Amino acid sequence: MPQRANQTVLDVVTWIQRHAEPALAYRFACRVGVCGSCAMTVNGRPRWTCRTHVSRVARERRLRIEPLRNLPRLKDLAVDMTPFFEKWQRAQGRFTPTRTRAEPMAAVRPDSAPRRAADAGIECINCGVCHAACDVVGWDPDYLGPAALNRAWTLVNDVRDGDRHGVLKAASAGGGCHSCHTHGSCVEHCPVGINPTAGIAGLKRQSLLDLVGGGLP
Amino acid sequence: MTPVWLFLAQRLTALILAPLVIAHLAMILIVADGGLTAAEILARTRGSVGWGLFYGTFVLAAAIHGPIGLRNVIQEHTPWRGRSLDAAMLLLGGLLATLGGRAVVAVVGEP
């Protein structure tokens, strides 16, 4: 296939589908690193393909492109993300509102400690790269994984959330934060620079504090 | 017992075990190097409250720490889950405590 300057791995996959293998199944949407749908395994590592330049990852002009690990394969390069998002729900990774739209917006100081902790993990694009990179997810099908636990940590630190205790309970139940081995593969591979391991350590700490009575207000 | 309690119990027993294991290993080396006989060792340990506490704590901490860790390993690498696994691990903890307790009594107790 033709080589071009600044060619991405997603460009390569698209070229193959358009010119060589029309039946090739893969997933993408935005092409600019926002939507999180184009993650694949590139030369053995999970990556967001739309922002991965071929020149940076090709070894001796060769690329091996595979579907993400730790998720069931649907066809070719497309995986079923259902288990991934089911784990978000199991970790109660959803906002519980305390106000109606008729009420004024909550005032949250951006420099307060909980808000800063939440901000550190809030930019997750749900790409599943950390889920694919995590060894514990590969071993234990019950483990919630770095993305769901990172989401839970942002909610535990969101003072507007109406059920922070519920989130903490869900995130520290069986298969939750205490199953993390702190390998740090999620940190190493997260394309947007989030540190889920730190969030999971925060969940462990917070669940222990809750146990001895010094936990969430 | 919730995963949080198990996590806490395993960390606390690890904190207890670390210095005890080092002391135990150091003692083995010193005793072996010094050429103490079994009778000489027993003369020091029999009736000693200190050694009783040392090895009693050791056995109890190991009996709690080991099964929790093994349960994690089993859950990560096999499909075994649920009450039967918990029961098996309780049994293992009981077995470790019993066998270890017998050894402590044998070393510390008066004949």
Image (tube, grey):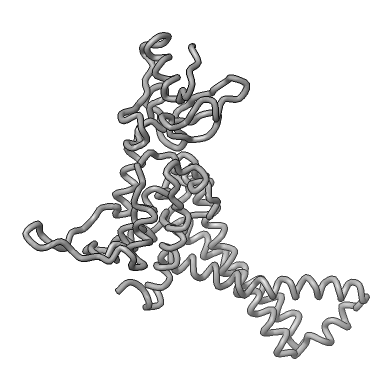
Quarter residue A169 falls in: bottom left
Relative depth, front residue between B73 and B106:
B73
Relative depth, front residue between B14 and B84:
B14
B102 w.r.t. A167: above or below: below
Q: Position of residue B9 (x, y in %)?
A: 51, 70
Query: Which residue occupies the extreme right position in the image?
Result: B35
Residue at (39%, 18%) from the top-left corner? A14
Quarter residue A126 falls in: top left
Is residue A133 rendered to the left or right of residue B102? left
Residue at (15%, 61%) from the top-left corner? A105
Relative depth, front residue between A111 and A137:
A111
Query: Which residue occupies the extreme left position in the image?
Result: A102
Q: Position of residue A203 (x, y in %)?
A: 41, 62
Residue at (36%, 13%) from the top-left corner? A23
Is residue B78 visible to us here? no
Q: Position of residue A75 (x, y in %)?
A: 38, 22
Quadrant location, the C terminus of chain A = bottom left
A174 w.r.t. A41: above or below: below
Quarter residue A215 falls in: bottom left
Is residue B49 rendered to the left or right of residue A37? right
Q: Position of residue A108 (x, y in %)?
A: 25, 65
